[in-house]
Image: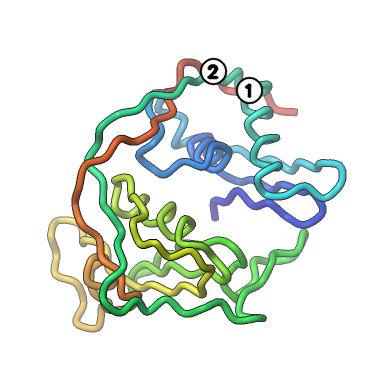
């Protein structure tokens, strides 16, 4: 399993390629990262970092930026590019369940990932039955971030929903070679968004902030 996992008490656990580390460190969607060598998405790095005090997730991500600059000799710059996107909007009857106390879990260092959805974020898991997105007490911005990966296009939030929600979304990705999905498979992502969450994805164009990699090097092991 690949992850970038902020933990209670200032601990940050990572088992992921540099691309996923960059996306988390800078708060990027899948398509907001440009440039870099092929190993950015293939080489897996393990990090167990500890910070003093009890920093927030945002503070830990700033520290991860500093780690990437120091250990990977990362140099980047920002550009704004007009790109194809998907706009996420609220339908006539949004079905976003309000967050319930105890409906999500926070990982504990040294213990397996809890079965309950994670608090404050949305995780994606894949199986032969389809793709599952689930999270507890998560904002719409977190759903938007994760949706960008299977859609392979930036997603822009135009829902005007400002709360936190218990999110569950099941859908089927296109089968290789255009094969027909199983009879009991969940619907495709566009139908699933409407039927299960009462939201809608629409193709559009929008100016998107892009992080361009000017330099990155493989680090030496500790």
Residue 55 percent location from the top left of the image: 77, 47
Q: Secondary structure at mark 1?
A: helix
Mark 2 — residue? 75
Specify the quadrant that holds the N terminus.
bottom right
CB under 8 Å between discs 2 and 1: yes
Horizontally, residue 2 falls left or right of residue 49, namely left
Q: Secondary structure at mark 2?
A: strand
Name above or below for residue 55 compared with residue 67. below
Q: Residue at x 27, y 54 (%)?
A: 87
Residue 57 percent location from the top left of the image: 67, 49
Horizontally, residue 190 falls left or right of residue 213, namely left
Q: Earlier in the sequence, mark 2 or mark 1?
A: 1
Specify the quadrant that holds the C terminus.
top right
Residue 43 percent location from the top left of the image: 51, 35
Mark 1 — residue? 69
Where on the picture, by quarter, is residue 91?
Answer: bottom left
Name above or below for residue 64 compared with residue 185. above
The crowding category of the residue bearing disc 2, from other C-alpha atoms within 10 Å (few below 14, some 14 to 19, many at least 20), is: few
Q: Residue at x 23, y 66 (%)?
A: 190
The crowding category of the residue bearing disc 1, from other C-alpha atoms within 10 Å (few below 14, some 14 to 19, many at least 20), is: some
Total marks in image:
2
Residue 106 percent location from the top left of the image: 69, 67
Q: Residue at x 37, y 54 (%)?
A: 157
């Amino acid at each position: 399993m690949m992850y970038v996992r902020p933990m209670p008490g200032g601990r940050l656990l990572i088992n992921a390629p540099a691309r996923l580390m960059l996306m988390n460190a800078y708060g990027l969607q899948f398509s907001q990262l440009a440039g870099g060598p092929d190993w950015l998405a293939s080489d897996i790095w393990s990090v167990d970092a500890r910070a003093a005090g009890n920093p927030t997730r945002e503070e830990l991500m700033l520290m991860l930026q500093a780690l990437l600059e120091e250990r990977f000799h990362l140099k980047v710059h920002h550009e704004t590019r007009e790109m194809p996107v998907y706009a996420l909007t609220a339908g006539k009857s949004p079905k976003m369940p309000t967050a319930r106390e105890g409906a999500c879990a926070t990982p504990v260092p040294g213990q397996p990932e809890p079965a309950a959805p994670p608090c404050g974020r949305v995780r994606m898991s894949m199986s032969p039955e389809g793709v599952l997105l689930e999270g507890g007490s998560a904002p719409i911005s977190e759903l938007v971030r994760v949706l960008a990966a299977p859609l392979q296009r930036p997603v822009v939030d135009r829902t005007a929903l400002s709360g936190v929600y218990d999110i569950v979304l099941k859908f089927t990705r296109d089968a290789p070679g255009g094969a027909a999905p199983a009879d009991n498979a969940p619907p495709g992502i566009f139908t699933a968004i409407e039927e299960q969450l009462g939201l809608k994805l629409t193709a559009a164009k929008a100016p998107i902030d892009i992080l361009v990699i000017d330099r990155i090097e493989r680090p030496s092991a500790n």
